[in-house]
Amino acid sequence: MKSKLPSMHKKIVPLFVSLFCFQAFCFADYYIDRVTGRGLGLDGSETNKLRVIDIREWNYVIEEKGGTKSKPGTRELHRNSYVITFNENQIQKEVQRIADDTMEEGLENQVFIVLNVNSGEVFAIRDWIPEFRTKKEIVINTYGVGSNSAPRVGEGLMLLGQLHGHPKEMAEDLRNIRTVSEFDIEVAKELGITIFAVDAFNSYEIFVSGKSVKNSRALHIHSVEENGVTKNFIGQTFGKNGLNTFDFSTYFDSILRTDKSVEIL
């Protein structure tokens, strides 16, 4: 038994060092390109912020400031980038309004979750074009600003995701299905974004929300990501007493940090 102790210690020490190095590596700011939304890499800071920057500024630091992890390079990156922040409260309110309006009107309503690349704020913006709303589908108008551009829905507004309500099916021979539609899947893959669908129809699974306005109800949310992978019942709008409310900030922070790198230089 004693002869095994040294070997056990030898295994533990490298593991400890590896874990320490891994944790230390995590503390650096992560950058995304303001045009494509793709990852650029890390700087040399000791924080863990998410930032948006012009790729030309990133390349300049690589060429002229000793690289992105050098002290001069990190200072230059901080000076020419925006820290990405998430307005979760505002997003939740807009999402709830979309769900309420879809249920009340019997028409699909939508809201865009966007990143303002000129300020770093992530928030929700309502689409107010009534002629685009129907009982079955809704139109998303986007445009690009350059090669491989992420979709835009306004000046500086990069589209990260779209959320819409699925109204109650009125035809007697049809019923609502609790998931995203095939159309939702196609659009998510085409635009390279996440599409969320809310069950905005009456059901015994609806709960009165303690946080929302106008006696709004907590409704189930489903999603499909840009790769076509669907996930059902990922959370709810607001949620009774704040329980099971889907956290859009945590979700999009993770999505933006996903390694979908653009070619540098």
Image (cartoon, rainbow, N blue to C red):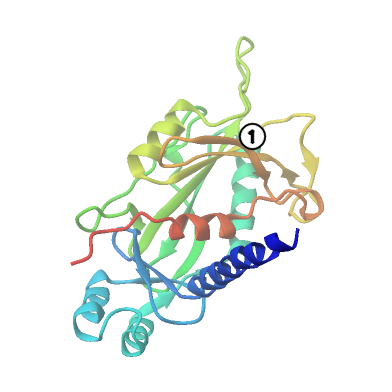
In this rendering, does residue 70 appear at all?
A: yes
Q: What is the number of callouts on the image?
A: 1
Q: Residue 64 placed where, x, y %?
A: 20, 85
Position of 60 with respect to 134 (left or right) is left
The amino acid sitting under disc 1 is: Asp
Q: Residue 180 placed where, x, y %?
A: 53, 31
Quarter-of-image position of residue 60? bottom left
- Seen in the picture, residue 192 relative to 32 is either above or below; the reply is above
User: In the rendered image, which residue does mark 1 sit on?
Assistant: 199
Q: Residue 225 placed where, x, y %?
A: 46, 41
Quarter-of-image position of residue 88? bottom right
**Residue in front for this viewpoint, 117 or 208:** 117
Residue farthest top in this picture? 173
Q: Quadrant of the C terminus?
A: bottom left
**Residue in front for this viewpoint, 161 or 131:** 161
**Residue in front for this viewpoint, 63 or 51:** 63
Q: Pointer 1: residues within 10 angstroms few (<14), some, or many (20+)?
A: many
Q: Residue 117 placed where, x, y %?
A: 37, 68
Q: Which residue is drawn at 80% across and 29% down?
A: 204
Secondary structure beneath disc 1? strand
Position of 184 with respect to 107 (left or right) is left
Q: Quadrant of the N terminus?
A: bottom right
**Residue in front for this viewpoint, 54 or 175:** 54
